Amino acid sequence: MKIKKDFDLVNNNTYKVHTIADYFMVPESISELITLLKELKEKNAKYLILGGGSNILFATPRYSGYVISLKELHNYTVSKDGHISAECGVMLPVLARKALDLGLEGLEWALGIPGTIGGSVAGNAGAYLCDIFTILDEVTYLDENLNIVTQKAKDIPHEYRHSVIKDHHYIVLKITMNLKKGNKEELESLAKDRALRRSSTQPLDYPNAGSVFRNPEGLFAGKLIEDLGLKGYNINGAMVSKLHANFIINYANAQGQDIAKLIYYVKDQVKEKYNIDLIIEQIIERG
Ligand SMILES: Cc1cc2nc3c(=O)[nH]c(=O)nc-3n(C[C@H](O)[C@H](O)[C@H](O)COP(=O)(O)OP(=O)(O)OC[C@H]3O[C@@H](n4cnc5c(N)ncnc54)[C@H](O)[C@@H]3O)c2cc1C
């Protein structure tokens, strides 16, 4: 296992904020992860599970505890008949690309989502009216007592951008899914259109962590924010994107606390003007 002390998380979060973790641990196998978690539980130590860091804001200069990166748990297999088995640290776009190369249908929406399988299951990541729970078969996770549980995904409560895995701080270890054969050319063309759409509607040139707020039912958070004239509004290097108002970008060395301040400012404005309580999609971690 790789272990680093006083480690700057800047390259492990897509907002690119500098937060120093007391310890940064990178287990290289599931059994190493379980041993580590048992030790930390025994010591009653504080820890945080990190995937791609693409849905999290480190809002304080320091994380006092252990950050456990699961990125090295990245074994996967994809068979031609569509059976997929993947560890939690596999990047979603890597798996989606592999499936597409084999002409398998069902993961093409995931190509532009820069997170791991584990993070995506925890938050039920999705796009274009699809989400990961729709295509999962089984999920193997650690429960609160570190028991290994394998469950059919359909039996795990989940909803739009949310799953019970997150509520209970379960840790996703691996997943399986079964995709069907599709028309490779059509899938490639769809993927290309969507990549173009993303690059023209999302501020991909600046560090960000995707949509800040969940869309309220029947509404678009970005539209509500844009209608308040908040595009471009900024606090110390953090800015509401001029391209897509539901994205906040780190355009000039913002600190986590600046981004958090801006998120809550936008939330308060929406509450005040529309009486709508926007739900923050991202995890705000306060050390
Ligand atoms: C440019 C951009 C575009 C995006 N577009 C989309 C989009 O279209 N749709 C969408 O849904 N999201 C989108 N996102 C957000 C993000 O990529 C997803 O939410 C992704 O699934 C997060 O995965 P992660 O591994 O980065 O999670 P992290 O940010 O590392 O962690 C997020 C949360 O999940 C927990 N977690 C991580 N791994 C595990 C695990 N193995 N078991 C249990 N909990 C775990 C963490 O503890 C944390 O609470 C986008 C982000 C960016 C930067």
Image: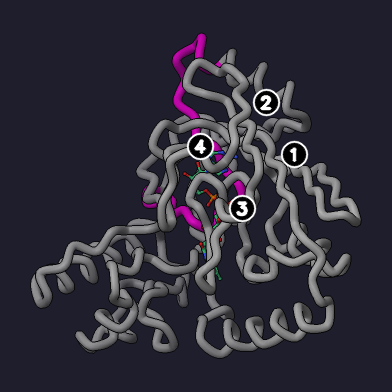
The answer to which of marks 2 and 1 sits earlier in the sequence is 2
Residue that numbered label 1 is attached to: 73
Tell me whether circle 3 and circle 1 mark residues in contact (CB < 8 Å).
no
Tell me whether circle 4 and circle 2 mark residues in contact (CB < 8 Å).
no
Residue that numbered label 4 is attached to: 155
Q: Which mark is residue 33?
A: 2
Tell me whether circle 2 and circle 3 mark residues in contact (CB < 8 Å).
no
The answer to which of marks 3 and 4 sits earlier in the sequence is 3
Q: Residue furthest right?
A: 80
Choose top left, top right, bottom left or bottom right for residue 101: bottom right
Find the distance from the CA under tag 4 to the CA under tag 2.
25 Å
Residue 263 seen in the figure: yes
- Say what amino acid the circle numbered 1 marks: Leu
Decide: few, some or many residues near mark 3? Use Cα within 10 Å; few <14, some 14-19, many ≥20.
Answer: many
Position in image of residue 92 (x %, y %) = 68, 57
User: What residue span does the magenta drawing correspond to?
Assistant: 40-60
- Say what amino acid the circle numbered 4 marks: Asp
Find the distance from the CA under tag 2 to the CA under tag 1.
9 Å
- Depth check: give the residue in front, 68 or 31: 31
**SS at mark 1 in the image:** loop
Choose top left, top right, bottom left or bottom right for residue 228: bottom left
- Depth check: give the residue in front, 14 or 234: 14
Tell me whether circle 4 and circle 1 mark residues in contact (CB < 8 Å).
no
Residue that numbered label 3 is attached to: 52
**SS at mark 2 in the image:** helix
Position in image of residue 163 (x %, y %) = 44, 45
Q: Which mark is residue 23?
A: none
